[in-house]
Amino acid sequence: MAQTCYQSSQRISALEARHRGGRMIRVLVVDDEALIRTGFQHILNAAGDIEVVAAVSGRQALGEVGRLHPDVVLLDIRMPDVDGLTVLERIRALPSPPIVAMLTTFDTDEYVAAALRMGAAGFLLKDTDPEHLALQVRTLAADGVVLSPKVTSTVVDGYLAGRAPDGGLIGRLSAREREILVLLADGLSNGEIAARLYLGVGTVKDHVSAILTKLEVSGRVQAALAAERAGLLRDRR
C-alpha cells in the first residue's frame, strides 16, 4: 500500500489554521503504560498548537472526556484494566464525541478492524516517528484520515470484509467525486482538498457527503479504505 495513502499531510494548511482561529488542539492520551503516556505528552506538548489536557489510564478515560472535552483522543486499543473497544464505544455514544484514533503496538492487531467499524478515525502505531505524531494529530483535528503507513492488507480486508463497495457503488461517483475521494484517502482535510482543487470548503463538504452516501459508508475512514479496496489508489503507489 502506498505510504502516501492515509498519512497526514506534511503541514496543516494556512486555510485550516485560519479556520481554527489559532485555537489549540486539545488531546487526551489514554494508555495503560505510564511511559507511553508521558512520551506522547512530551512530544505533543512540544508542538506549538497542541495541548495534552490529560494522559490517563483506561478506567479514567470516559470521565476525563466528559470533564475536559478534548478535540482528539488517542486511545490504546488493548489495556488490562478496561477494553479499548469498550471505551471507544462509550465515547462514540456521547452527544458530541471527540475524534478518536487508536494506539496499537501491532499493525496487524485484529482489534483494529473492529475499531474502524465502530467509528475510530484511524490508528497509529506506538512507535510512530515523533516528527510525524504532531502532524497526524493535526490531521485528525481537521477531520482527516490517519492510518499508520505500515497498515497491512490484513487490516484493510478485515475491516472491509462483507462491506466493500462493489463496482456498481464506485460507479456512482462522478469524476470530481473520485478525485476528491483519492485526496481524502491521502489524509487531506476538507480545507486542504479545497485549496488543492480551487474549490470552496462548503463545496468540498457537499462532495464528501455525497461520496459517503453513494458508497454507503458512515465516515471518511470507511471511504478511504473503500478507495484502496476498489483500486482507485493503485496509480499512486
Image (cartoon, grey):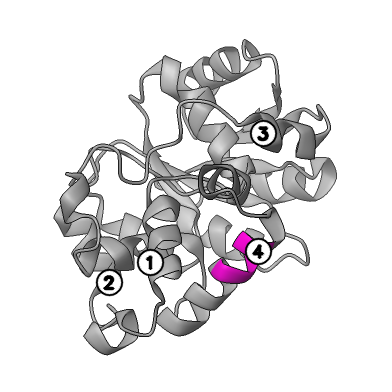
Residue at horizontal 30 percent and vertical 38 percent from the top:
4
Q: Do the residues labelled 1 and 4 touch (CB within 8 Å)?
A: no
Q: Which of marks 1 and 3 is nearer the N terminus?
A: 3
- Residue 115 appears in the picture as rendered: no
Query: Label 2 amino acid?
Result: Leu
Q: In which quarter of the image is residue 27?
A: top right
- Determine crowd level at label 2: few under 14, some 14-19, many 20+ residues with C-alpha closer than 10 A: some
- Disc sitting over residue 178 in the figure: 1
Q: How far apart are marks 2 and 1 (CA)?
A: 19 Å
Which span is picked out in magenta?
Answer: 203-207
Residue at mark 3? 27
Q: Earlier in the sequence, mark 1 or mark 4?
A: 1
| Vertical position of residue 201 compared to residue 170: above or below | above
- Determine crowd level at label 1: few under 14, some 14-19, many 20+ residues with C-alpha closer than 10 A: some
Q: Do the residues labelled 2 and 4 touch (CB within 8 Å)?
A: no
Q: Distance between the residues labelled 4 and 3?
A: 29 Å
Q: Earlier in the sequence, mark 2 or mark 1?
A: 2
- Disc sitting over residue 203 in the figure: 4
Q: Magenta span has 204?
A: yes
| In this picture, residue 168 sits left or right of residue 23 | left
Mark 4 secondary-structure assignment: helix
Query: Label 1 amino acid?
Result: Arg
- Disc sitting over residue 160 in the figure: 2
Q: Nearer the viewer, residue 159 or 62?
A: 159
Q: Nearer the viewer, mark 2 or mark 1?
A: 1
Query: Label 4 amino acid?
Result: Thr
User: What secondary structure characterizes most of the magenta part?
Assistant: helix
Q: Which of marks 2 and 3 is nearer the N terminus?
A: 3
Q: How far apart are marks 1 and 4 (CA)?
A: 14 Å
Q: Do the residues labelled 2 and 1 touch (CB within 8 Å)?
A: no
